[in-house]
Amino acid sequence: MTTPPPSAEIRQIVDQAMQAAHHETEAGNLEQAFALYQAVLDLQPGHAGAHHGVGMLASRLGDAETAILHFAAALEADPGQEAHWLAYLAALVETRQFAAAAELLQLGRSQGMQGQAFDDIERQLASSGAPESAEIDAAAALFAQGRSEEAYAAARTLVERFPQHPFGWKLLGGIYHRRGEAQEALNAMAMSARFDADDAETLSNLGMLLMRANRLDEAENVLQRATALQPANADAHNHLAITLAELGRLSEAQASADAALALDPNHEKAAITLALILQTRSRPAEAVAVYRDLLERNQENTDAHSNMLFCLSEMPGLTPAALFAEHRLYGTLVEQRTAPPGPRDNTPEPERRLRIGFVSGDLRNHAVASFIEPVFERLGQRPGLALHAYYNHTLNDAVTERLRGHLPHWRDVAALDDDDLERLVRSDGIDILIDLSGHTAFNRLPAFARRLAPIQASWIGYPGTTGLTAMDYYLADRKFLPHGQYDHLFTEKLVQLPLSIPFEPVASAPDVAPLPALANGYVTFGSFNRLSKFNSEVIRVWGMLLRALPDARLLVGGMPDRHDHTQLRAWLDHEGIAAHRVDFHGRTGLHDYLKLHQQVDLCLDTFPYPGGTTTLHAGWMGVPTLTLDAGTVTGRQTACILEHYGLHHFVAHSIDDFAAKGLAICGDLTALATVRATLRERYALPTSDAMTRVADGIEHALRLMWRRWCQGLPPAGFEAPLPPSR
């Protein structure tokens, strides 16, 4: 009996579920992805894509038997898809079912399956044996000497002649990693581990690659085995520490970082890992001490120095002038080691087409991407601009692919050193190069110190100066850094953009719920900021509100493992806030995170480093944020957002003002309910015409900077006027 085709309604539901499953898989939410694929199979038992998806998830979780069953079902349902053949073949090879794999490969060949991937599997099935030790040593020496092309040729020869021997794959994985070809590196290292499951070094490398691909559960399993096989492998302990930290298990992560440093006290990467964990656990002073110790031994560790500056920006009690001095010291040290820039070929024609470059490691599922995407989408179509992206991360996800579609020139530069990056940017003839990272992870500020382009600017990624004199401009929202008030805290000249980049809300967000306090009879405060932003002074001020409103509750979201927010709990205890009044929630998927806001009446901000994207998400869910604008650059983020949306009465200017405003807001629940009902309308994405005007303002600001350079004038701060409507 033939199964009738699904209805249009079923097809639509299935398509939506498949899209959601892909999204959850990319986000690392494997249980949710599996449930969605299973729901599809309940509706359409023969759905090839769902079977393939379940097979991939099962393979990632080490359940080869389930993976093979579903790969077989996917292939039977849709034999025209090359991916279904390759996944099934790989699973059979992984489980060493070589005879079955050979039969399947022969069947695939008879149905027209050709290409390098199939050729590699065929060679793998046909060959056995091991290379001579001298050949292994020679290939390893080429890699160690940095002779990458020769090492690559040797590795390819080894895997072609001995496809079931682990060394060739291991070497190939290392070469791909050095090149920044993340997926190829992961595939090759996984092949090496498949043929030698007891090589701790291979497992350490594989775990690191899995972690960078956001496959955290798999990474932990592999790295736990690596450390068990070779307890003295400091790299494996460090990779495990990073993975556990990403999983939110901070106390375990710190133990692993400590283990790495006990084995190798000079392990700089492990020291950075430890400092990052301490910072995340709201222990910034200890983190800074680790960074300073590391920098005393090696001033050239710019990653550690940038991390320390970010950490200092979250520490209470540091004056704006002192924080600026720390950033300036970074710039001085970096620029002292940098050779003067060479001549350049940029033609000083004021109105010609400009080549604009953007350097970032965040062109992926990241807050920066959510702001820059609407800009790329519109500026990429402007005839007066040619946009270039220099992407400094190896992770490519759905957001990365979408962003690629907006920019005609895309360069993956994570594997390039500063010399190679300089050559690339100069050969592209970039006129204005824009940093989107500042002192956050995956920045390339040391390369900017070389003066890669005639004009260099920093924007979006970091609320503060880079400290580099080679960075000419800092682009800012006119409300974020009002003219004349913060110029002395930047090495860059400030450019006030005429219109701000709007927040792009989550289209699938839950509905705004009625004000919970009206039904509960008490106010629920909320916070969704990361743990590193909390400090004793923040909790002291919150405690003033909670004591003044003895029935009030506090909901804290986005918390790591329960053993890792004991410091926060201790601060609350010190303020006399009983445990039953505080509800901690762990990290969740985006939908559940937004849904938690339905339980919150008012968000309380952290300081001196307030929220940003969290404030915007809360506003979209109808929840305003009470913030403290302490007059620092970093501390302006939430205040700027609230001022844009006409919520000035939620901005306090002192600790006493914060408490007074909080009590006043909670004393008028009718007014708070009215604000809640209107926030989503205020935060709504502007029309296409309005976004075009935003892009107009940005393009005009870039043009003004360029005209000034063409006239031979030095950089100067200015407030960019909004150009006439098109």
Image (spheres, helix red, strand yellow):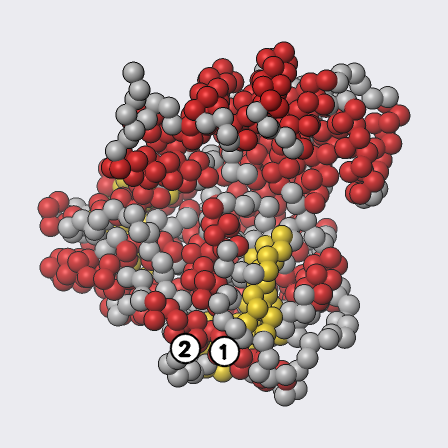
Residue 40 lies left or right of residue 362; in this view the side is: left
- Please name whichever residue, 217 or 299, is drawn nearer the observer in this view of the structure: 217
What residue appears at the point 64 percent right and 21 percent down from the top-left corner? 194
Residues at marks 1 and 2 touching, judged by CB atoms closer than 8 Å: yes
Question: Which of marks 2 and 1 precedes in the sequence?
Answer: 2
- Please name whichever residue, 413 or 580, is drawn nearer the observer in this view of the structure: 413
Residue 439 in sight from this viewpoint: no
Quadrant including the C terminus: bottom left
Quadrant including the N terminus: top left
Q: Which mark is residue 343?
A: none
Q: Which mark is residue 701?
A: 1
Q: Position of residue 36 (x, y in %)?
A: 34, 31
Residue 9 in sight from this viewpoint: yes
Cα separation, mark 1 vs mark 2, equals: 9 Å
Q: Position of residue 253 (x, y in %)?
A: 53, 35
What residue appears at the point 59 percent right and 63 percent down from the top-left corner? 388
Query: For residue 654, which quarter of the picture?
Result: bottom left
Residue under label 2: 498
Specify the amino acid type for callout 1.
Answer: Ala
Q: Secondary structure at mark 2?
A: loop
Specify the amino acid type for callout 2.
Answer: Pro
**356 over 66 or under it: above or below:** below
Q: Position of residue 189 (x, y in %)?
A: 66, 30
Residue 43 lies left or right of residue 293; in this view the side is: left
Crowdedness near tag 1: few (<14), some (14–19) or many (≥20) residues, C-alpha within 10 Å: many
Q: Secondary structure at mark 1?
A: helix
Residue pushed farthest right? 134
Q: Position of residue 445 (x, y in %)?
A: 63, 61
What residue appears at the point 26 percent right and 37 percent down from the top-left corner? 8
Q: How many labels were placed on the picture?
A: 2
